[in-house]
Structures are given as C-alpha cells and as structure tokens.
C-alpha cells in the first residue's frame, strides 16, 4: 500500500532536504507537490485541504524556517500531520465487558467480511489468548455459512451453526445464549453484505445490533475503493453506531487514499489492516508506523513484532548452535530460512518495513518475485537428505534428476546452488564473528543508499 504516494512524496521531500535554507516560496512549491501526490493517491479533497493547511501553518513558522536543519524539520512536520490525519495512536478493540464481548461485522458485499471474521478470531486467540466463537447471520449469500464454518475450523475457533431458513435476529440470539453457556470470551457475528441505500437491509442490521448489543461494531471495507471507502463508512455510521473500521485488501492497494481519508471523514478509527489472503494476514493499524512507511522510513517495530510471532525459535536456536559448533549451513537450513521469510510477507513485504529499503523505486520492487521462493523450495525438496546436507556431491546426473523432479531447467538449479554457496560463505563468516568485518566489506556496494 502507498507505493505511488511514497514514490512521489519521496522525490518531493528529497528536494526539500537538499535545500540549504527554506523560504516561503520553496515551501509553497513543495506543498503543491505534496497536494498533487495526495490527490493522485485518491485521498478525499477535504482531507487534503485540511492536511495542507496544517502543514503550511507549521512550515512557514519558526518551527521550520528558523530551524538549523529546515529540510528535516519540514519532513518531521509532514510525518506528524500524516499521523494526526490517520488518528494519532493505535486504537485496539475494547473487550472490557461481561463475557461474551460481542463484535458485529458490517459492510458491503465483497469487502471480505467473512475472511476478516476468521482472521480476527485467530488474532484474538493467538495475541490475546481469548476463547472465540463465530456465527454467520448471512442467510442471503449461498454457501456463506459453510464458508465461515470451514474458516473457523482452520483457525480453531468455535462455530455456532445457523441455517439460511432462519431469521438473522434469531440466529444472533441463539448464538449469544450458547456463548454464555460455554463461557466464551468473544463472539464475532458475520452479517450479510448490504448497501447503505437499501432501507430494508439497513433496518435488519439495526435490529441485529439492538439484539446483540455489541461492544464493537466494525465496518469492513475494501481499501481499493479509495476515498469511496470513507464515504461509504460515513453513510453506514449515520445508521449504525460504528466503533471502528477494518481496511481489507491493502496488499493490492497501491494508492492508500482510504487509509488517509477514513478517520477525518467518519471520525472513526481504523483498527485493523487486512494485508493478504492468509488467516494470519491481519495487522493492528498504527498511524505513526504507517506514516513512517509512507515517507520511506520503514517500520522496524512492526517488523520486530512479526518476527517474534512468526519466526520458529526452536529452529533459529538449533541453527545458531549448529553454526557455533562449526557445522556448515546446509540446504535444509537454507529452505528453513526461506520459509521464515515467506511467512513474514516475502522480500517485498520486508522491504517496506526496513529503513533505507522502503523507498526504492517501484521498478526495482517489481523485479522481486517471491514465487521464486516456491521454486527454490521445490528444488530442495526434490533432493535426498544426504544431498541437502552435502550439496557438493550434486553433480550432472543428480542435477538432471532434481531438475526433473521440481519442474525446472538444470540452469536454474545451477543458479540456485551458486546463490546457496554465496549464502553459505556469508554464514561461515558470521559464525566466526566476522559480522562487523563483513558489513564493512559490504559498505559502498549496496544498490541503494
């Protein structure tokens, strides 16, 4: 998300940073560029106007013009105002109530409500150690109930069965009764997609809301609809007392207009971002971290949190012990490292969060193909355990067998083995305590600074 906006803002702010001193004129030029960047990212016009107004007021004052480093001071102002626009701080779910804490999910058709219910159930179980039950009150969409049942099984959440012949209000009443009986901490209610102009359907969800009395009412919206996402959320909020927004499909949204518009237009916080199709692809929304990503400064805190949650500590410790004992880094270890990286969003996902790498060009990012990981994995899986442990024995006949087994050409296998050899040498240096020496050798050779 924000790829286009990051590129444009990056160029503008780089020019500002290079100015020896800032004047009202060059601040005006920079703000014009920032304004165009926001509009191209499909940020709502009232939001853009207010944002530019706040930045201008601070930028032409003592805070920037009289600063010893005016370029840096201007970037700091832009970063802080982006954070303010998106909501200052991360607003987590409020579950402080007599169990079960009911969460009602609302939104348009196709926004990804049902998959978000499963992601949220997994998040609450893993991160907050809550017992979670899910129920579908969507009696209109074929297979909606079965879809939620399958997803609930995947994330190990309790599933309350419902039937398309039932009334949604009755389903909800029965689910709450069962959740109380089972001492469930959180009950998440999936509802049918509806338009805010459909008075009958909006009347139904108001009824469901009255019966459920949810502590959280979350509006699930597709980020790729841009500023329309903010306008739809506002229309829903006029009928239903929303407590927050979940932005889905942000991994496919290169603009980011929805994230920058929603808080100011609706007054409601974005609580989560859907960042992929997998059940674990749900992130808490941190406005300050997102502002940092937009400005190409990376997001180290989220990266660390992801690493803590997704890296297999046992495997990492075994590898560390193995390296200490002087035993070589083999192809099985290489495969494990690639799998860990894939679980954290692949190379492109990591680059967005690493300072210095997050602002490289879209062209460079476009050349990164995370599917290559799958091909490497297939090649390693086609080897025998002996070959993985001793790659030097892989000669012509073995190469032909491995290539055929993994569906690649021998040349591609040769390239992979060459890359692995380079990685092996690097790991050897690290094991000997040569990390600092290695970093000094790499300095100046980085493709982007």
Image (cartoon, rainbow, N blue to C red):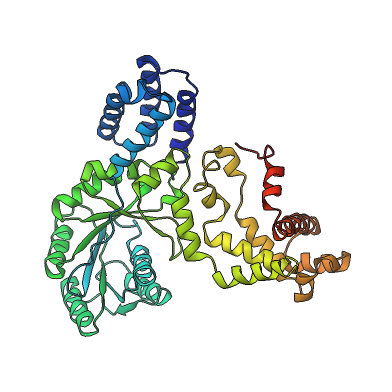
Residue furthest to the right in view is 396
Q: Is residue 197 visible?
A: no
Q: Height in image: 9 above or below 292?
A: above
- Relative to the observer, which residue lies in front, 294 or 60? 60
On the image, the x and y values in percent for residue 96 come to 20, 67
- Relative to the observer, which residue lies in front, 209 or 335? 335
Q: Height in image: 396 above or below 350?
A: below
Residue furthest to the bottom in view is 181
Q: Residue at x 39, y 71 (%)?
A: 126
Quadrant of residue 157 within the rendered picture: bottom left
Quadrant of residue 185 within the rendered picture: bottom left
On the image, the x and y values in percent for residue 432 come to 73, 59
Q: Residue at x 16, y 72 (%)?
A: 169
Q: Residue at x 58, y 52 (%)?
A: 347
Quadrant (top left, top right, bottom left, bottom right) of the N terminus: top left
Q: Is residue 368 left or right of residue 394?
A: left
On the image, the x and y values in percent for residue 191 come to 25, 65
Q: Height in image: 329 above or below 356?
A: below
Quadrant (top left, top right, bottom left, bottom right) of the C terminus: top right
On the image, the x and y values in percent for residue 83 come to 33, 41
Give the number of marks: 0
Q: Is residue 257 left or right of residue 321?
A: left
Q: Residue at x 29, y 45 (%)?
A: 88
Q: Is residue 288 visible?
A: yes
- Relative to the observer, which residue lies in front, 7 or 437? 437
Q: Is residue 337 left or right of residue 206?
A: right
């Amino acid at each position: 998300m924000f790829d286009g906006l990051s590129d444009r803002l990056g160029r503008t702010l780089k020019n500002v940073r290079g100015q020896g001193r800032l004047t009202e004129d060059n601040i005006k030029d920079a703000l014009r560029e920032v304004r165009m960047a926001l509009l191209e990212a499909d940020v709502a016009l009232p939001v853009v106007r207010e944002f530019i107004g706040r930045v201008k007021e601070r930028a032409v004052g003592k805070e920037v013009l009289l600063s010893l480093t005016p370029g840096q001071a201007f970037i700091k102002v832009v970063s802080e105002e982006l954070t303010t626009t998106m909501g200052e701080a991360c607003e987590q779910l409020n579950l402080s109530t007599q169990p079960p804490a009911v969460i009602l999910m609302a939104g348009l058709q196709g926004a990804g409500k049902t998959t978000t219910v499963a992601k949220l159930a997994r998040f609450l179980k893993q991160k907050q150690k809550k017992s979670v039950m899910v129920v579908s009150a969507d009696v209109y969409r074929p297979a909606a109930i079965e879809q939620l049942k399958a997803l609930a099984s995947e994330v190990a959440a309790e599933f309350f069965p419902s039937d398309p012949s039932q009334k949604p209000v009755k389903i909800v009443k029965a689910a709450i009764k069962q959740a109380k009986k089972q001492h469930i901490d959180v009950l998440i209610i999936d509802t049918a997609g509806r338009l805010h102009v459909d008075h009958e359907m909006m009347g139904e969800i108001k009824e469901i809301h009255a019966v459920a009395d949810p502590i959280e009412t979350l509006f699930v919206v597709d980020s790729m609809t841009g500023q329309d996402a903010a306008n739809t959320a506002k229309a829903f909020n006029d009928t239903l007392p929303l407590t927050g927004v979940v932005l889905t499909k942000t991994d496919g949204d290169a603009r980011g207009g929805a994230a920058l518009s929603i808080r100011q237009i609706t007054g409601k916080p974005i609580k989560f971002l859907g960042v992929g199709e997998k059940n674990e692809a749900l992130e808490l929304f941190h406005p300050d971290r997102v502002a940092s990503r937009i400005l190409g400064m990376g997001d180290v805190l989220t990266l660390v949190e992801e690493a803590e949650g997704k890296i297999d500590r046992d495997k990492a410790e075994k590898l560390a012990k193995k390296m200490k004992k002087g035993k070589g880094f083999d192809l099985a270890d290489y495969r494990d490292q690639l799998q860990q990286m894939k679980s954290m969003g692949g190379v492109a996902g990591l680059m967005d969060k690493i300072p210095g790498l997050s602002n490289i060009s879209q062209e460079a990012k476009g050349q990164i193909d995370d599917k290559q990981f799958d091909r490497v994995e297939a090649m390693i899986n086609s080897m025998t355990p002996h070959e993985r442990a001793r790659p030097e024995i892989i000669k012509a006949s073995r190469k032909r067998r491995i290539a055929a087994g993994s569906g690649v050409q021998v040349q591609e296998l040769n390239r992979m083995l060459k890359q692995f050899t380079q990685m092996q040498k690097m790991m050897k240096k690290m094991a000997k305590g040569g990390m600092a020496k290695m970093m000094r050798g790499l300095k100046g050779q980085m493709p982007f600074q």
